[in-house]
Amino acid sequence: MRDRSSPVDGDDPSNVLFETWLTARAAIALLDRALASADLDAEDFAVYSVLRQAGEISPGELARWMSAPATTVSSHVKRLVARGHVRQVPHPGDRRSYRLTLTDAGQHAHTSAGQHFLPALAAVEAALPRPAGDVQQALRELHGAIGVAAERV
Amino acid sequence: MRDRSSPVDGDDPSNVLFETWLTARAAIALLDRALASADLDAEDFAVYSVLRQAGEISPGELARWMSAPATTVSSHVKRLVARGHVRQVPHPGDRRSYRLTLTDAGQHAHTSAGQHFLPALAAVEAALPRPAGDVQQALRELHGAIGVAAERV
DNA sequence: GACAGGTAGTGCGAGATCGTAGCATCGGAG
DNA sequence: CTCCGATGCTACGATCTCGCACTACCTGTC
């Protein structure tokens, strides 16, 4: 009977994946502006965040974390090492690989970029009609579901 | 007293914006694979979706929709026009601008890419522990909050 | 212990992104 | 009507992304 306003049409562009795309683009645009006067852009800031939390991580693991192809990560590494923010330490037990760590300079850069990031995050959270934790939980579930779907190819 | 496992630390990378970034990257990676054998990639599919729904839209509006700089949209337009999927029609009342529409070929390409997209979307929704509509609602709120935060610069 | 197939990372090159600068046009002030 | 600042779009170029092809190394089999 199709009397719901709910999207059922084949050409309704509105769906979780599309909305994720739009939201992420808006988020990155916001952060790029917020971080404009910092040394890092939004992408870098995110990568540094992963590195900092991980402590030590291999390029492959990083690639999986950020769902990026290995070659892209490779380029990042080259750039960040040249910048003096990341150091490559040998991987114990696998000589094909190595491990990445933020240098002190890298940690410092991340921290001071955080000074620009945090107000933007606070502004977004303040504008949310419900607790940020709820939204974050929904995102985690979605992220997990995408992971499951990806396995089923 | 800090006895919750909940993130409170200043250097906890976990937050709505970071999680949005991770989730979107995963979504795009999934779609790029799902659409690999189609004529459109994930980015194109999203743009075509906007164009199709909008009917007619100016480059500037499109740029605002997808939170992209004008130059990026300009490149897209050039490519899509060359591909024969988009047509530029004069803008009534503003000769600096014009309006974009999907050609029949463009609509067809979008539809057939949809054949690859929909199963992926269905797989994600099936893996979600709660209704996709809930998650989508949370995303819309977040998107809106980012928009509000962006105005406050 | 040698070989085969799989896995980790990289060089390269085609194409994409987006900041800067620049042009055409608009719209309001006088 | 004539300015002039604001707005819409694009050319160009520096930088980034990522598929393909390749090398080095790991691991299981015989």
Image (spheres, coloured by chain):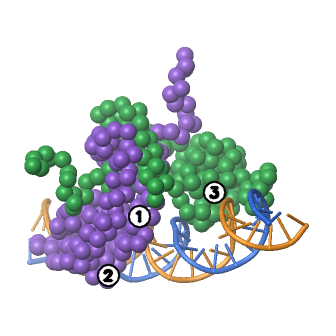
Chain colours: A green, B purple, C orange, D blue
Let me know if residue B69 appears in the view.
no
Nearest the eye: A56 or D26: D26
Inspect the image, locate mark 1, and give the three-letter code of the amino acid beneath it: Ala
Determine whether the residue tagged by mark 3 lies in a helix, strand or loop.
helix
The chain containing the residue under callout 3 comes to A
Where is residue B113? Give x, y as percent. 32, 69
Query: Alpha-carbon neighbours of circle 3 within 10 Å: few (<14), some, or many (≥20)?
Result: some
Q: Are marks 2 and 3 in contact (CB under 8 Å)?
A: no
Mark closest to the chain's N terminus, 2 or 1: 1
Task: Please tell me whether residue B153 is drawn above or below residue B58 in the rendered image.
Answer: above
The chain containing the residue under callout 1 comes to B
Asked if labels 3 and 1 share a chain, the reply is no
* Residue bearing mark 1: B34
Q: Position of B144 compared to B56: left or right?
A: right
In the picture, the disc for residue B11 is: none
Q: Where, by quadrant of the figure, is residue B28 drawn? A: bottom left
Nearest the eye: A142 or B76: A142
* Residue bearing mark 2: B83
The span from disc 2 to disc 3 (Cα, nearest Å) is 36 Å
Give the position of the N terminus of chain B as an image quadrant: top right
* Residue bearing mark 3: A60
Q: Where, by quadrant of the figure, is residue C2 drawn? A: bottom right
Inspect the image, locate mark 3, and give the three-letter code of the amino acid beneath it: Gly
Query: Alpha-carbon neighbours of circle 1 within 10 Å: few (<14), some, or many (≥20)?
Result: many
State the residue at coordinates (60%, 63%): A70
Inspect the image, locate mark 2, and give the three-letter code of the amino acid beneath it: Arg
Task: Please tell me whether residue B4 is drawn above or below residue C26 in the rendered image.
Answer: above
